[in-house]
Structure formats: C-alpha cells, structure tokens
Amino acid sequence: MEGFIELRAKGRLDGYWADHLSKALEEVMRQGDHRIRLNLSEVDYISSLGIRVLVQYYKKLSSIDGSFSVSEPSPNVRKVIKMVGLEATLMPPTPLSGTALIQAETSRHIEGINAGFEVYELGTAGAAGMKCRIVGDSTLLEGCRFSEANSRTAQFPEFSSAVGLGAFGNSFQECSGRFGEFLAVAGAAAYQPSDGSNVPDYLLSAGTFVPELQVLYGAVCEGEFSKLARFEAKPESRAVGWSEIVETALEIAGADHAWMVCAAESAGLVGATLRRPPINGTISGAPFEHPEVRNWLSFTTERAYNRSLVMTVGVASRSPAGGLEKFLRPLRREALPAGHFHSAAFSYRPLQRGLIGLTKTVQSLFQTEDLLGLLHLIGDDREAVGVSESEFVRGACWIGPITEIDLKES
C-alpha cells in the first residue's frame, strides 16, 4: 500500500513475543515511519498482551496523525480481534490512508553539516520579534548567595516561556530546601528539586489554573514564534550536536539573539543539575570552583536520557553584546554561540511530521508521557574526555528572534 510500511509477524503473539513486537514497532517509528500495516497471516495465537500492543500503537500513531492497521489476520487472530470489539478499529473495511499532513507554502530547506532542516513560516504574527526579560540576578549563583530577598512569585501562562532556578511552592521558606532548575513553556512548567529526591515535578495549566513558581533568577520570553524548523540527522552522522542546531536556528531567525523551544528525539544529553539549593552560601567557591563543585553540582558522566523525547527551552546568542552576557554559557570550547538551555526528558513518543503546533505538542507530551528528569545543558570541554555536547536525532524547533531585552532584573 502506497505510503505505508508493512511488517509481518509469525508464530505466537503471547506475553513473551508481544514485547518483541512492541520493540520492533517502536524502532520503525523512531526511523520516521508513522503509517504502519501489520500482517498477521502467519500468527496462530494472540493473547491479551498481544492485543494490548496492537491497541497501544494504534493510539500512539493516531495521536500524531499517523495510522496503524492489521492486515490479513489468520482465522484465529481475526476471531479474537472481533470478540474483543476491535475489528472496526484495527481492521477497517477501507484501508487507512493516513491523515494528510499540513504543509506550509513557504517552507525552505537548509543543508547543515550533520543534519537537514526544513523551515516553515508561522505567519506574520511573530514578525515583530519577541521580548526577553531578566528576572533576578544570576551572578548570585556564584557563592550560592540567594536569600529570601531574592525570591519572587512568578506565573507562566501559555504565551510565555522561561528557564531559570525556582521551585513549586507558596513561599521562599517552603521552597528553601528544594530550589533547582526549571523550564516553562506553553502553559506547562517543570523543575528538578535539589533536595536529593531526584524526582522531577511539573504543573500543567487547566481552566483558570496557571503554573506558578518561586523564582530565584531566570529569563522569561513573551511573544509568538516566527519559524518552525524540522530537522533530521543525516544517515552517515546518525546524530546532530546541539551547537549546530543552535547555530542554524540563529541563522534562520536572522538575529543575534533568539528564543528557542525544541522537541526532539535524544541521542544523549550532556548537562548538570544542582545537588543543593544555592541559598545563604558561605563558601565563595561554590558552586563552580574545585573541590566545592563536587558538593554543589551533579554532572552527567556520560550522555543521559538516550532515546527519550526531550523538550528544550532557552535563549541563544551569537553576539558578545546585547546585555544577556551574564545569563549565557558557551555551548562548546568557542565562546560563541552561547546560550542558556534547560531540557526536560520524557519517555519516548514520536512527533507528528510537518507543521505542528507548540501548545498541542507540549500539552500532550506532559499529559501522556513520563517526565524522567531535567538538566541544564552544557558543553563538556575537559581535555581528558574531549569536547562533548548533547546530541539529537530528529525534532522540531520553534524559533523567535529577540528584538527587545529588558535588563531591569525585576
């Protein structure tokens, strides 16, 4: 069938082999094939776990406008599917053709070193650019000198996004033992507590409820994104580094500074998280100087969250000027490009192809997948291990040029 990939199973779909089938289907999805037909003509037996796998992938693919169907089932398999009431769902009388993908008339292709990028215009709403606002004083992280006077309550509605240090709670006292890295985007907020639990948490907007955090410092961006860039690593590269994605995003934005939100399949993240809340510090070398860094920061010893789906939020810059310098970090050994990015890792799910909406993507990800952890992305430039950075396989980046920067440190 045109536009489909067909898999053929043979033998039994019981508790043991159902897991093998699930892994095979996931690998097909990871390769970018979102319309799958499963031939069960040589399957003699199917258990409830086998049915569960079929339903699971039908739902996964339907959620991203793909399709999943069963073809040529053996008599025994057809009987079971019919008895459980899934005949119309898994074996529709007319073969599924898949939902037509939305295409943007103004798309263009950019060929990168390790990936190809397809760029979509998101209309004229974002043409005026985005406004970035600094909250708090990021230099207080040196020495871990934040106090109650430096904490403020901040809400993050759907039209804003942010990265920084904060915690969920009603007061500084309530959060004083838990402040850690956070990100907020499209009505969702997630953070990594520094209380030793290593269990991330999140809030999701609903009705009149808006995520709220106690924030020590951060950058908040408001406005509408003007570009969507879909990227995929070249077969010979297998993965593309975060710095290449950022450099291309700045080129696409046509600006020295840009705000980015990226949903992508991870090939491994390189980053750090706080071990302790950075408040009321008395040691001047904390948290960056040796040997204190060991007590305050936890670094990935190897790439983390491989093969997960990652939501990354933050600001990028290719200029040493503009006022954001105190907030930015190099993405590799060179000083530029620089940025400040936090990544939330989730259990894997495929992304819908083509032009997709940010809010729908973010909300469905938080609603249906497990939040595994959150990292501040860094470039590891230690001579002993060489340059190392986060890498990705494919994904979608929403990009907006920053045309106004408010440095009042509100």
Image: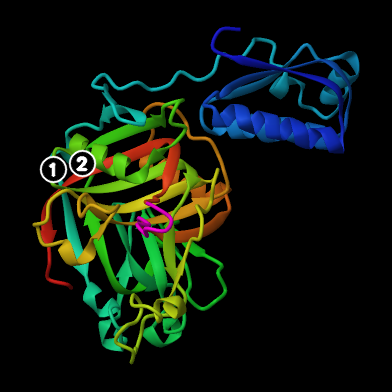
Q: Which residues are magenta?
A: 379-386
Residue furthest to the top in view is 1
Q: Position of residue 90 (x, y in %)?
A: 71, 22
In reply to whether residue 2 is colored magenta, the answer given is no
Secondary structure at badge 2 equals: helix
As drawn, is 42 to the left or to the right of 175?
A: right
Residue under label 2, please give it. 250
Query: Which residue is tagged 1?
Result: 255
Q: Which mark is residue 325?
A: none
Q: Is residue 362 above or below residue 234?
A: below
Please say if the residues under marks 1 and 2 sit with CB atoms less than 8 Å apart: yes
Q: Is residue 212 above or below residue 329?
A: below
Q: Amino acid at mark 1?
A: Ala
Q: Is residue 101 left or right of residue 11?
A: left
Q: What quarter of the picture does the C terminus occupy?
A: bottom left
Residue found at x 87% / y 33%: 14
In the image, 267 versus 58, the foreground residue is: 267
**C-alpha span from label 1 to label 2:** 6 Å
Of callouts 1 and 2, the N-terminal one: 2
Q: Secondary structure at mark 1?
A: loop
Looking at the picture, how far across and down is residue 23, in whole percent? Answer: 69, 34
